[in-house]
Amino acid sequence: MNTGAVSANASTDPPLNNRNLISPKPVDYYPDPDRRPNGFRLRNGTELSREGDQGRGLSLVSDNPIYIQGDFNLHRNGGGTRLEEFRTLLADNYSNFYERTNPTDPDFAISTRDRWRPAEILADAVTILSNNFCDGSIQDGFLTAGGLPTVPTSANPARYGCQGQSSDALITSYLNQGRPSSSAVTANELGNRWMRANQAEATAFRGGETGRSPIRLDRFANPFTTSGGTRFGTGYDQGYVGISEAKPRNNAAATRVNATIVSGIVPSRPNQSYGGLHNFPRFIEDWNGQPLFISGSFVQLTFSNYATAPFDQDAFEVGATPGAAEQIKYYEAPNRRWGYDVGLQYAAAGPLASRFQKVERVRSEFYNEPPADDPYILNLCRAIDRNRCSE
């Protein structure tokens, strides 16, 4: 992106490539002031089967980011019992991987007895959210400034549709933002620190259902405080939590996802990694060692066009050079229990997977019986019994 020297409004996109008319913009590393966080989220997707589906699953394609929240597309029978290829279930730490001597489960991946279906997610970026993910709202970052790292008790979890969190310790996704960091704000001031669009709600939020109108912002997107004794308050200018500082993050819970994930990655540069294969599905929660089970397949196609923020977030601005220290304070990795879903071998290929199939009309295999004195065969023979092998 060619940024304007005076104003962001003067910024322009780089010219298209003359050969294929593709924009180089996805790999320019610069934040886009016109970008809006649009995307799609899959929720309540534990079961994808439906009456008369003939074993067909779900294929979702978007050039925007896609978020998968909670358990998704589980292998299980009609009674809710988890199914795997073998009747002996795999231990969570894979310790019995080679010890499952029981026969294979005849119900596994059979459409009439397994609720699982082939699922294909193709998106600009794919982020996994746990069952505990709590949305919140942007005001959460203001209401907790300078105080405890949880949303005030009056913000009932039911308001956000959150699970697994109590109202007295509610951490929402918006506490992961660069919220005001003024040490002058005490816990007792959390409710009436900020001015509201409806000035009758100046005391804001602490009164239960009051404080519903938006917090007033100045032209620099800073909130107005109630200090100063003026009718319209005073614009806040005391700093924000930076990318290198620890921030309250959603506490993730163990989650299972069964899907083929096709997505892009962000480019890397010196001192700034793209996160590697282990960050191919992206994260924004504190998993703190909680397991994430993914069974399926990963396909990385190209660079992301939309979700292009750097994985290592220490150089966002134009001309900034990444430092040696890695700044990924916005998430903590899960215990990755990932592997190929052999159920895909039992089901017909979906619309996306079928495009990766290549049917050979002429068999390319050939068989050859090398002579006994072939050097390679001799080495194999001598490894067994050197005295019986001769040239």
Image (cartoon, rainbow, N blue to C red):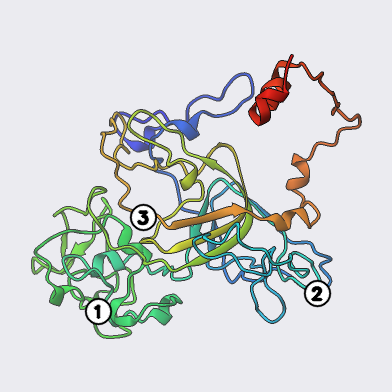
Mark before the other along the chain sequence, 1 or 3: 1
Query: Residue visible at 29% across and 40% down?
Result: 314
Q: Amino acid at mark 1?
A: Ala
In this view, the residue in front, 386 or 358, is 386
- Which disc is residue 268 wearing? none
Query: Residue visible at 46% across and 62% down?
Result: 291
Q: Amino acid at mark 2?
A: Glu
| Secondary structure found at label 2 | loop
- Which disc is residue 331 wearing? 3
Q: Position of residue 123 (x, y in %)?
A: 59, 48
Answer yes or no: do the residues labelled 1 and 3 have beta carbons within 8 Å?
no
Circle count: 3
Q: Residues within 10 Å of mark 3 (few under 14, many from 20)?
A: many
Q: Quadrant of residue 230?
A: bottom left
Q: Quadrant of residue 41?
A: bottom right
Q: Residues within 10 Å of mark 2 (few under 14, many from 20)?
A: few
Vertical position of residue 85 compared to residue 241: above or below? below
Q: Position of residue 142 (x, y in %)?
A: 25, 65
| Secondary structure found at label 3 | loop
